[in-house]
Image (tube, rainbow, N blue to C red):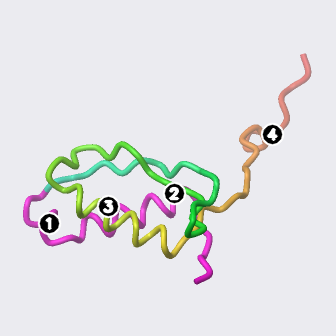
Amino acid sequence: MLRKTRTASQLQDEVSRRIHRAPEVVEDGVKIRVPRPQSQEPDASGCNWTMKHFGNAIGFERIVDDALKSVQKEYNLSEEAKDLSSLFGDPPNS
């Protein structure tokens, strides 16, 4: 299956959405911190990103893992590198 590409923020939002809609998470009212995706060499399935160190996830590891795996099956991390210096224009000449 060909994956769609998404930015790091979009992937982070999608994983968070899937975790926080799980009935157990909703019922307990817990807020799980979802880290930014990290680029990696494509794995055996072709996925080019991962996430590690979810916060406040003790007891919800299965839900976190299921959400992460389902998003990884659907999306790859966009490889567009953004030049952060261009956000602020060229530095002034001193």
Residues at circles 4 and 3 in contact by the CB criterion of under 8 Å: no
User: For the point 35% across and 61% down, which residue is it?
Assistant: 16
Mark 4 — residue?
89
Give the x, y percent position of residue 52.
Answer: 41, 46
- Please state the total of marks drawn on the protein image: 4
Residue kind at label 4, given as amino acid type: Gly
Residues at circles 4 and 2 in contact by the CB criterion of under 8 Å: no
| Circle nearer the N terminus (4, 3) | 3
Mark 1 — residue?
26
User: For the point 62% across and 60% down, which residue is it?
Assistant: 42
CA separation in Å, label 3 and label 1: 17 Å
Q: Please identify the residue farthest to the top as the structure is shown.
A: 94
Residue kind at label 1, given as amino acid type: Val
- Helix, strand or loop at label 1? It is helix
* Mark 3 burial class by Cα count in 10 Å: few <14, some 14-19, many 20+: few
Mark 3 — residue?
65
**Relative depth, front residue between 27 and 86:** 27
CA separation in Å, label 4 and label 2: 23 Å
| Circle nearer the N terminus (3, 1) | 1
Give the x, y percent position of residue 6.
Answer: 58, 67
Mark 2 — residue?
9
**On the picture, is 93 further left or further right than 89?**
right
User: For the point 60% across and 51% down, which residue is it?
Assistant: 40
Marks 4, 1: nearer the viewer: 1
Locate the N terminus by quadrant. bottom right
- Helix, strand or loop at label 4? It is loop
